[in-house]
Image: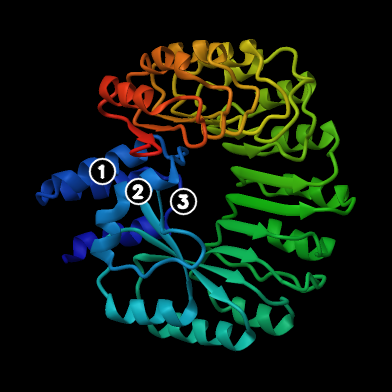
């Protein structure tokens, strides 16, 4: 493997997740060196980087790369492939064995290392310090209380790009987080954290993505400080208490958001949907498992001209025809999830025929769909992935008809 390829992989590892420049340079290098299939794969994967796709289909697409890297099986579900990169979660010892056996990694890889004790964290620090592999992106998943000793070790791990905090005891996190120059993603799995410690997370200079799960306490002043993370592009706050509209207004007016999950604002209303106009760069929007009955005018959605992915799974009521009709005005909409909507009917899918660029459609777990929706789905000529798992009203012969009409589309479940 030439130094040029190493340099390109290192550039991808150090770059912002959404920076296309090093990826396109990597695709050009592959093309110039005869790896035309790999080059086309990179270009296709990065065309719509917000698209998540169907896990099973992603696995099939990335299988040759995973085999080439000889990655060990992940311990939290299958190895994940998305936007050109391969991601896997491994225990520290498994990661060490793989890293020592594969010193020349020739594809962008993100490794999430599970840490369950201070000694494991210290061992990880020493290994990463002595094992130079600049082409890897490294994140940690911490299953321990982050006391001063833990923070002291983390302060020395400048290569980290992602952190996830999963303290099983949910001890209140009081120690401030050290500044990590490459840290782009933080996931908090509980709200046992002081305001000062939360502020130290928000202060990370390269922070692009924040996920805050299981918010049970009334911590609105803390949540309001998210506005200070000026580089934040992806935000998911999963609150068990409905958050006030003013919070959404603060975030949308203060942050250059490109990915947003609205679970904390349930039920959603017209006023809150209108607030999203302050996010003209929005590419990924999730309103899954929400109550949208208060949205009388879905018109503002049509203004998200860059939207690539929309998740309307598991809504607590039927999806209005106006909502789906509005989607026809989204020129870059590539992935749409309507799964687990028990009220979704065949006729409700008619507006989808205008989505000429739709590549991925999730209709899994929709029991009211029947073979009558097949002519509608057959019009979606750009589809590459269609998930009908659990939508048993569409019979086997009707699925086979779809496969003949859409030969470039993989339809799940396969063979059923």
Looking at the rendering, which quadrant does residue 274 occupy? top right
Q: Residue at x 88, y 54 (%)?
A: 217
> In the rendering, at what x and y percent does residue 392 appear?
50, 30
Local secondary structure at mark 3: loop
Q: Secondary structure at mark 1?
A: helix
Q: To which residue does mark 3 refer?
A: 16
* Residue 68 percent coordinates (x, y): 23, 63
Q: Vertically, is 336 above or below 251? A: above
User: Between tags 1 and 3, which lies in front?
Assistant: 1
Q: Find residue 311 and report its horizontal and vertical position in percent.
A: 58, 32
Cα separation between marks 1 and 2: 8 Å
Residue 9 seen in render = yes
Residue at which label 1 appears: 41
Callout 2: SS: loop
Relative placement, left or right, of 255 versus 42 is right
Mark in front: 2 vs 3? 2
Residue under the image location 50 percent in, 82 percent down: 124
> Mark 1 or 2 closer to N-term?
1
Cβ atoms under marks 2 and 3 closer than 8 Å? no
Residue 95 placement: quadrant: bottom left
Q: Is residue 205 visible?
A: no
Q: Are marks 1 and 3 in contact (CB under 8 Å)?
A: no
Please tell me how crowded label 1 is: few (under 14), some (14-19), or many (20+) other residues with Cα within 10 Å. Answer: some
14 relative position to 254: left or right? left
- Which residue is disc 2 drawn over? 84
Distance from disc 2 to disc 3, alpha carbons, whole Å, reads: 14 Å
Q: Residue furthest left?
A: 34
Residue 281 badge:
none
Work out whether 374 lies above or below 66: above
Query: Which callout, 1 or 3, points at the residue further toward the start of the chain?
Result: 3
């Amino acid at each position: 493997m030439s130094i040029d390829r190493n340099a390109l992989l290192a550039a991808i590892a150090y770059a912002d997740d959404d920076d296309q420049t090093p990826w396109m340079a990597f695709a050009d290098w592959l093309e110039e060196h005869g790896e035309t299939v790999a080059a086309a794969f990179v270009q296709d994967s990065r065309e719509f980087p917000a698209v998540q796709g169907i896990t099973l289909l992603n696995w099939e697409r990335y299988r040759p790369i995973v085999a080439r890297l000889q990655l060990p099986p992940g311990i939290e579900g299958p190895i994940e492939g998305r936007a050109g990169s391969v991601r896997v979660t491994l225990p520290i010892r498994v990661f060490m064995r793989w890293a020592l056996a594969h010193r020349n990694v020739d594809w962008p890889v993100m490794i999430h290392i599970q840490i369950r004790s201070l000694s494991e964290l210290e061992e990880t620090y020493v290994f990463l310090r002595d094992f130079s592999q600049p082409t890897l992106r490294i994140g940690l998943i911490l299953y321990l209380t982050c006391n001063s000793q833990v923070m002291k070790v983390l302060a020395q791990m400048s290569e980290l790009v992602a952190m996830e905090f999963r303290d099983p005891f949910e001890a209140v996190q009081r120690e401030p987080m050290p500044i990590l120059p490459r840290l782009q993603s933080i996931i908090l799995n509980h709200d046992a954290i002081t305001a000062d410690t939360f502020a130290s997370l928000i202060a990370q200079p390269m922070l692009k993505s924040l996920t805050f799960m299981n918010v049970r306490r009334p911590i609105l002043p803390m949540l309001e400080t998210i506005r200070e993370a000026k580089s934040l592009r992806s935000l998911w706050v999963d609150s068990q208490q409905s958050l006030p509209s003013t919070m959404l207004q603060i975030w949308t007016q203060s942050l250059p958001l490109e990915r947003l999950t609205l679970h904390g604002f349930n039920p959603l209303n017209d006023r809150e949907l209108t607030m999203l106009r302050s996010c003209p760069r929005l590419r990924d929007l999730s309103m899954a498992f929400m109550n949208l009955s208060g949205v009388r005018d879905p018109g503002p959605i049509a203004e998200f001209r860059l939207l690539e992915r929309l998740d309307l799974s598991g809504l607590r009521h039927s999806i209005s025809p106006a909502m789906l009709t509005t989607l026809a005005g989204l020129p870059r909409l590539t992935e749409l999830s309507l799964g687990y909507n028990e009220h979704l009917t065949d006729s409700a899918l008619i507006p989808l025929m205008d989505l000429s660029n739709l590549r991925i459609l999730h209709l899994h777990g929709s029991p009211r769909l029947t073979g009558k929706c097949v002519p509608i789905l057959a019009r979606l000529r750009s589809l590459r992935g269609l998930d009908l798992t659990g939508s048993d009203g569409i019979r086997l012969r009707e699925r086979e008809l779809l496969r003949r009409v859409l030969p470039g589309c993989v339809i799940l479940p396969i063979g059923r």
